[in-house]
Amino acid sequence: MSILTAYDPLVTFNTLNEWFNGELQDDPTARVERNWYPAVDILENEDAFLIKIELPEVDEKAIDMKIDHQVLSIRGERKMEEEGEKLKIRRRERSHGSFERAFRLPDTVDCEKVHAAMKQGVLTITLPKKEETKPRTVKVEIK
């Protein structure tokens, strides 16, 4: 059994590269200090785009949404549970603090009719398509 290990000069470089690319976000101390990014699903049907964002334990009053120049911005905050006389935190893995997500909307979205609803910790944003951009079938007659 050998106690020698081969030196790889690229290990330090790879570690720095992972750090700069955000690969170390699973580090619990880093997660506490930085903003968090809630998971998002984007779906599309014939009439609308749907954006579903996981926001458990986020008060809908703490969410700010706006559309400016075809960019939908969502900001908010999940409050951290505080330790107290009866509550001692033994492990913290869930992210907390402020978050921000932004999505460039296609020109086919009718921004005046966008609406959102919060249900069971999931924010669903409905982005209706403009009538003139919805797919339709037109019969062409031969003369």
Image (cartoon, helix red, strand yellow):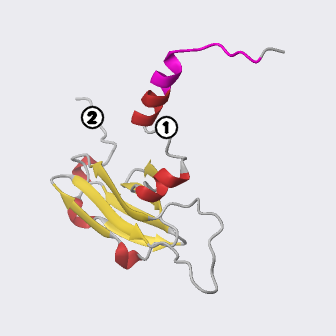
Q: Relative to the observer, which residue lies in front, 108 or 35?
A: 35
Q: Give me the C-alpha separation between circle 2 and circle 1.
A: 59 Å
Q: Quadrant of the N terminus?
A: top right
Q: Secondary structure at mark 2?
A: loop
Image location (x, y in percent) of residue 3? 76, 18
In this image, 18 relative to 64: left or right?
A: right
Hey, what amino acid is under mark 2? Glu
Which structural element holds mark 1? loop
In magenta stretch: residue 12: yes
What's the residue at 50%, 41% (across, down)? 24
Task: Say above or below: 78 vs 26.
Answer: below
Amino acid type indicated by mark 1: Glu
Q: Position of residue 109 (x, y in %)?
A: 26, 53
Location of mark 2 (residue): 141
Residue 7 is at least partly visible in this image: yes
Residue appearing at x 39%, y 34% in the figure: 20
Q: Earlier in the sequence, mark 2 or mark 1?
A: 1
Q: Residues within 10 Å of mark 2 (few under 14, many from 20)?
A: few
Q: Quadrant of residue 72?
A: bottom left
Task: Quarter of the image for the C terminus: give it.
Answer: top left
The residue that disc 1 covers is 23
Of marks 2 and 1, the one in the foreground: 1
Quarter of the image where one finds residue 126: bottom left
Q: Which residues are magenta?
A: 3-14
Q: Position of residue 56 (x, y in %)?
A: 52, 68
